[in-house]
Image: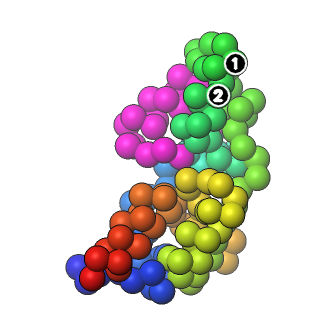
Amino acid sequence: MASILPTDRVEALIGKPVATIVPSATLRDAVDAFAADNVGLLVVVDPTGVQGVLSERDIVNAIADGVELELERVRDVATLDLLTIDEQSSVIEAARAMAKAEIRHIAVARKGVVTGILSIRDVLAVLLEAHDA
C-alpha cells in the first residue's frame, strides 16, 4: 500500500465497517462492543438513522457518575452532536476539525451518510509518516 499524505483524502484511511449500537442497549453492551470491535467510538443508530455517538470517554464519565452499566442505556449518555467530515476532505483538514472540536474521533461521510470513523491515531500516523519522510 502506498503512503498516505496529509493532503490525501480521508476516504483513503477508511477501511473497516462502522461499529454501531442501538440507543436502547445497555452501557454493558456498549463496553462489550468496544472490546469486540476494538474501537473507541460507536455510532448510535436506530431505524430512522444515526442518532449520535458513544465514546469510551462517555463510558468513563458515566462510571465516574456512579451509573450501573447493566441498567443505564446508551441513549442516556451518548453524544447527540455528530461531527462529520466529507470523505473528500484531506487528512490535514480532518486533523484541524478534530483539534478545534477537541475530539478523538470524527465521522467520515459521503453525501451525508456515515461511511467510516477516523481516529486521532489514524491522523497522527499519517502526520508522523509525512514528517519522517
Q: Quadrant of residue 82?
A: bottom right
Left or right: where 54 falls relative to 4 = right
The residue indicated by pointer 1 is 65
Report the front residue among 54 and 112: 54
Looking at the picture, how far across and down is residue 80, in whole percent? 76, 47
Looking at the picture, how far across and down is residue 65, in whole percent? 69, 18
Residues at badges 2 and 1 in contact (C-beta under 8 Å)? yes
Specify the amino acid type for callout 2.
Asn
Specify the farthest residue to the left: 1
50 is higher (above) or lower (below) than 123: above
The residue indicated by pointer 2 is 61
Specify the farthest residue to the front: 132
Q: Quadrant of residue 67?
A: top right
The structure residue drawn at horizontal position 48% and vertical position 58%, both measured from the top left corner, is: 119
Within 10 Å of disc 1 (Cα), the crowding (few <14, some 14-19, many 20+) is few
Q: Is residue 30 magenta?
A: yes
Left or right: where 34 falls relative to 113 = left
Specify the amino acid type for callout 1.
Asp
Report the front residue among 105 and 49: 105
Q: How many marks?
A: 2
Looking at the rendered structure, the secondary structure element under dot 1 is loop
Report the front residue among 34 and 92: 92
Span shown in magenta: 23-41
Spatial separation of the CA atoms under disc 2 and disc 1:
6 Å
**Visible residue check, residue 19:** yes
